[in-house]
Amino acid sequence: MSGETVLTREALQKMQVDYFGQFLLDNAHFLEEMYHKLKGETLKEEIKEVNGQKMLVTVWKETEGLTPMLNDAGIDRTMQVLSLSLTANSATGKMDDFVLRSLAFKTYILLVKEYELHYEDYGFTSQSQLYMLSHLIFTNILLHLSKSTDMALLKELFSSYNIHEIRGNQPQQAQEPSMTL
């Protein structure tokens, strides 16, 4: 072979499982999505030329006619609170449902108090807007943290990886799919 890098099936499977786990457990994707949504942006597909070929690329774009509920100062403060609340530990910690809900609710209360204290500074136009945004953020935090309930997601990932690893080490004829009704 002339300088080619060859990956074994097992190495490729491990990379895929590791990437999948990192993607699910890393809060950066969630925080990035929240940031863009607070700015009033949505994902849109655009045709771009990459290395001489036209490709469909997904990018964040402002949504026409949509005014963000917060100005940049409010968005920056919200993101600061969220990034400090949603750490890697909160994604992988062993929390029961009560602790998880308490953490989400405390973050919600911090944001509501911050929004009320800086109502005009953050560009709110009504109290209902303030509470609606706070509730939507709370719901998203709660749903995001729910993957940490009793480490269910981590257990599932490791269980799936172990089953996949065991199946990968079996002889080829034993890997036929089985179906139960």
Image (cartoon, rainbow, N blue to C red):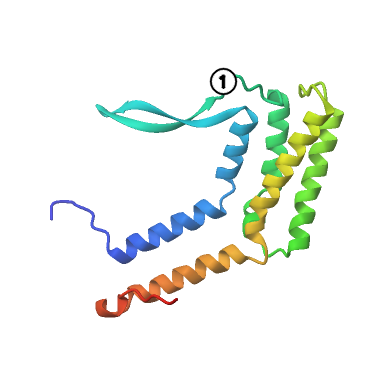
- Residue 94 found in image quarter: bottom right
* Quarter of the image with the C terminus in it: bottom left
* 161 in relation to 100, above or below: below
Q: Residue at x 67, y 45 (%)?
A: 140
Q: Please, what secondary structure does the residue beneath circle 1 have? A: loop
Amino acid residing under circle 1? Glu
- Residue 15 found in image quarter: bottom left
Front-most of residues 5 and 12:
12
Q: Residue furthest left?
A: 1
- Residue 76, given in percent of the width and then of the height, sits at 69, 30
- 45 vs 135, left or right, is left
- 32 vs 69, left or right, is left
Q: Which residue is mark 1?
A: 64
- Residue 47, given in percent of the width and then of the height, sits at 36, 26
Q: Residue furthest front?
A: 181
- Residue 35, given in percent of the width and then of the height, sits at 62, 34
Q: Residue at x 78, y 43 (%)?
A: 108
* Mark 1 burial class by Cα count in 10 Å: few <14, some 14-19, many 20+: few
Residue 50 can be seen, yes or no: yes
Q: Residue at x 68, y 24 (%)?
A: 72
